[in-house]
Structures are given as C-alpha cells and as structure tokens.
C-alpha cells in the first residue's frame, strides 16, 4: 500500500467571514446529502450541578423555532423523507439533517432556522425534562447503568468530565430552560463551530448555500475557552465498593487517566488496546479471563479520546465470589501487555482489522460525515482519511511497546465494584484497601 489512500475523495474546507468553518466532501454514489451543525462544546461545558445541559439543548433546538413549532418541523422533515437528529456528547453538540440531494437548499434552510432562530418552547422543555428524568430513573434499575453512572463522578470528581453526558435525575430536576438559553448564547459561537456537508452536492453550491444562510450569524460574546486541561480532582487509585446485597454478580469498572485525542501515540494506542481488550474474542482479556478461566462472558477496554485527557476504562462483570480473582486477572493481563505491547502476530492481527474495517465506515454519507466531524472537531487535517491506514500500518512492535508502557498503568487503577459486599469484600481487602461508597 502507498503512503496514502488516494482513491478516497478530496475533502474541502472554507472559513466564512464570521469564523464558521465549512468542511465537506462530494459523494456521488447516492443522491443523498448529510448536513451537520457541529458546535465544539458539549457536556464538559455543562454548568456545575446541571449535567445534561448540552444534550438537552441539542434536543430542544429541534422542538420548535421562532417560526414553527415541533409538529410543523416534524411534518416538513417527514414530508421530504428526511431525518433530523440531535446529540450532545463530550466536546461537541450536533444537529444533523439528512435527505435527498435535490432538497439540499431547503434542508440547509431548515437547519439554519433550527440553530439560528431557536424557539426554546417552554412546554416542550418541561416534557423533555420529565421524560428524560423518568428514563434515567428506569435505567438505574440496571446494575450496569449504576456502575457506569457511579464511575464518572467517582473518578473525575467535580472536573468537567465528572458526570454522564445525559446528566442524572438530580441534575435534570435542577435544570431550567434559562440554562439551555445561556448555554447556547455562551457556548455556541461561529468561531467555534463547523458545518459538515457530505453528499451529491458540488463544492461550489455547498459554499454558496452556506454563505447564504449562515454568513449573518454573529455573537456579542467571545467564545468560551475549550476545556483541555488535565483534571485535577481524580480519585486515588484503589478499590471502591458500592454494596448491592440484592445482586449475585459484581459489575466492575477499572480505569485510569488516558491521553487526549491530540496524542501522537493515537494509532499505536488503538492497536495496543485492540490487543488488550478492544479486539473482541482475539483480545488478551477475553482469552485469559473468559476462554481460559471462565470468569466472565464479556470484558472490554477502551481509551476514551477527548479534547482533554479522558479515561482509559475496562468494563466487565463476574459472579460475586470471583470479584477479587477477576480484578487480579485484569491487573495481570494489563501488566503482560504493558511489558511487551503484544506479540508480532497480535499486532499484525490488530492492523489487519483496522485496515480492513476502515473503508466500511466510509460507504455512506452518514459514515463519512461521522469521520469528518471528528476531523473538524479535533483539527486532524484534511488528509486524515487518506493517511489513516498507512499510519496504522506504520506502527511497529517498538512503537506499540513504547505506547503500552507509557499509557497502561495496572498499579494505578481506580476500581469500582457494584455488588454484594457480604460476598466479595473480604477477598477484595486482600488486594488493597476497600472504600465503601454511600448507597443513598
């Protein structure tokens, strides 16, 4: 393979006078277009105690503008056979409309109306808040959700990453419509936003239409600075136990701080993580702890790459009496991979997976748009897609080993166990100090 995948279409980028960035790609295989508004602020910018603000903002913008209510918007979208989606996440908030390329101008007008002329309908907000609170309360019946939602505030404390993207029942109860308006005014700014256009639309038309509908967008506010610092309120390594005497299994989350998305070791770490626990049945964690020892059905590891350093996290479950054995096994496998970075065969297998699967995500406008959003959000460069597979293949065993030794720290794990203390606490204490978390 050459140093570039030159069969891929060229990306284009233009900056409007107001600072809004247009990034796009002409895609001629289907008469479809995907248009995404990307604000480069997300859940990390939620006000203290009001987790879920960015995610709720994304949805409320689609529930009515200054000119049309939610029903009128929905009828317009459905009448064109189009789709409208909104989403808040770490580092970004997005609103996407997809439809026939022949409706491109009308779809762009719709998206601009939603973003630039928001209605913030009070009744829709109240319904949204109560629906989301009810959904979260229901989710907390699932031990997996309890573990996921307990881990973030445990690990990150009061740092901007220390809450779930969609908030909690308590944070949503505290949320007011004015919080959404304030977030929009202070966090959504043309200089910190992009439009991503992928589809059967010529570049010249995409630029002209973007200028037509978005060039007048301005803001009296200076863009709020993006969060990109190393969190200062991390939990101390150790074992934290949330007693759930009704359970027969323990949910386990083990993690420590990882690097930001800007790390030059990104490609090496993707491969190392595939070897450790991101590669399904070929990963070491699955082979050692499921296939050989029968301790679990599923276990995965993942580096959560964000603008600021995000978490490296291993998630699994096991019968309560095997909790301590599982944690020791995780530490052992992490130590193995940290020392070697994986064998030559494992590295080749990981590279083969990423090289082979990468094009599959580029077969539709939506898949391409997903990749281009990351390029715009993290300033990855317009040649990122062309260089992705060559960069994966350029990682050798030395680079994999160096990345593993730099970023895997089995002795520094913050370990959360959600399970019956009466069946696992004694054995856990043999590993290290156990801190019992409050259950209220």
Image (cartoon, helix red, strand yellow):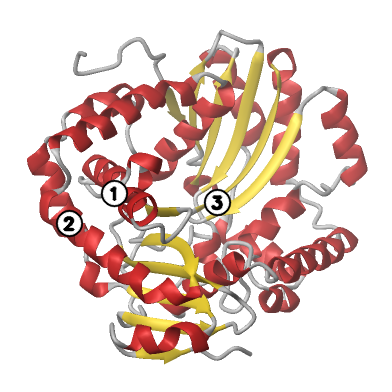
Measured from the top left, where is residue 342 in percent x and y? 17, 45
Relative depth, front residue between 69 and 5: 5
As drawn, 162 above or below 78: below
Q: Quadrant of residue 405?
A: bottom left
Measured from the top left, where is residue 169 in percent x and y? 71, 74
| Numbered tag placed on residue 336 in the rendering | 2
As drawn, 36 above or below 54: above
Whether residue 298 can be seen here:
yes
Q: Quadrant of residue 103?
A: top right
**Mark 1 and mark 3: span between their CA atoms?**
44 Å
Q: Is residue 328 left or right of residue 249?
A: left
Relative depth, front residue between 258 and 341: 341
Q: Which residue is mark 1?
A: 284
Question: Could you tell me which residue is drawn at 45 percent across and 79 percent down?
Answer: 154
Q: Which residue is mark 3?
A: 189
**Mark 3 and mark 2: span between their CA atoms?**
46 Å
Question: Could you tell me which residue is drawn at 56 percent across and 26 percent down?
Answer: 197
């Amino acid at each position: 393979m050459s140093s570039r995948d030159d069969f891929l279409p060229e990306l284009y980028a233009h900056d409007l006078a107001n600072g809004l960035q247009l990034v796009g790609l002409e895609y001629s295989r289907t008469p479809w277009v995907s248009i995404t508004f990307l604000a480069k602020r997300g859940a990390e910018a939620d006000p203290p105690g009001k987790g879920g603000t960015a995610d709720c903002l994304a949805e409320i913008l689609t529930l009515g503008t200054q000119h049309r209510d939610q029903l009128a918007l929905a009828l317009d979208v459905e009448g064109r056979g189009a789709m409208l989606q909104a989403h808040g996440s770490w580092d970004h908030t997005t609103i996407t409309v997809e439809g026939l390329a022949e409706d491109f101008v009308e779809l762009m007008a719709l998206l601009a109306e939603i973003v630039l002329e928001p209605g913030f309908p009070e009744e829709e907000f109240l319904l949204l808040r109560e629906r989301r609170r009810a959904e979260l309360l229901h989710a907390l019946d699932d031990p997996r959700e309890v573990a996921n939602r307990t881990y973030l505030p445990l690990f990150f404390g009061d740092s901007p990453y220390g809450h779930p993207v969609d908030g909690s029942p308590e944070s949503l109860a505290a949320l007011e419509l004015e919080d959404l308006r304030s977030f929009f005014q202070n966090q959504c700014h043309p200089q910190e936003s992009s439009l991503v256009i992928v589809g059967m639309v010529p570049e010249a038309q995409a630029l002209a239409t973007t200028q037509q509908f978005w060039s007048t967008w301005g803001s009296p506010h200076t863009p709020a600075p993006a969060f990109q610092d190393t969190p200062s309120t991390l939990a101390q390594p150790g074992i934290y136990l949330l007693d759930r005497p009704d359970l027969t299994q323990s949910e386990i989350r083990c993690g420590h701080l990882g690097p930001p998305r800007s790390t030059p070791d990104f490609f090496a770490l993707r491969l190392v993580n595939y070897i450790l626990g991101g590669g399904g049945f070929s990963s070491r964690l699955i082979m050692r702890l499921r296939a050989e020892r029968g301790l679990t059905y599923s276990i995965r590891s993942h580096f959560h790459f964000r603008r600021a350093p995000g978490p490296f996290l291993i998630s699994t479950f096991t019968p309560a009496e095997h909790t301590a054995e599982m944690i020791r096994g995780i530490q052992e496998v992490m130590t193995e991979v940290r020392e070697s970075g994986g064998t030559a065969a494992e590295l080749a297998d990981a590279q083969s997976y990423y090289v082979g699967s990468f094009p599959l995500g580029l077969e539709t406008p939506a898949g391409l748009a997903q990749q281009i959003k990351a390029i715009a959000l993290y300033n990855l460069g317009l040649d990122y897609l062309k260089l992705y597979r060559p960069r994966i293949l350029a990682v050798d065993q030395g680079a994999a080993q160096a990345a593993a030794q730099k970023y895997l720290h089995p002795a520094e794990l913050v370990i959360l166990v959600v399970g019956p203390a009466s069946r696992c606490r004694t054995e856990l204490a043999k590993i290290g100090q156990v801190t019992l978390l409050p259950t209220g």
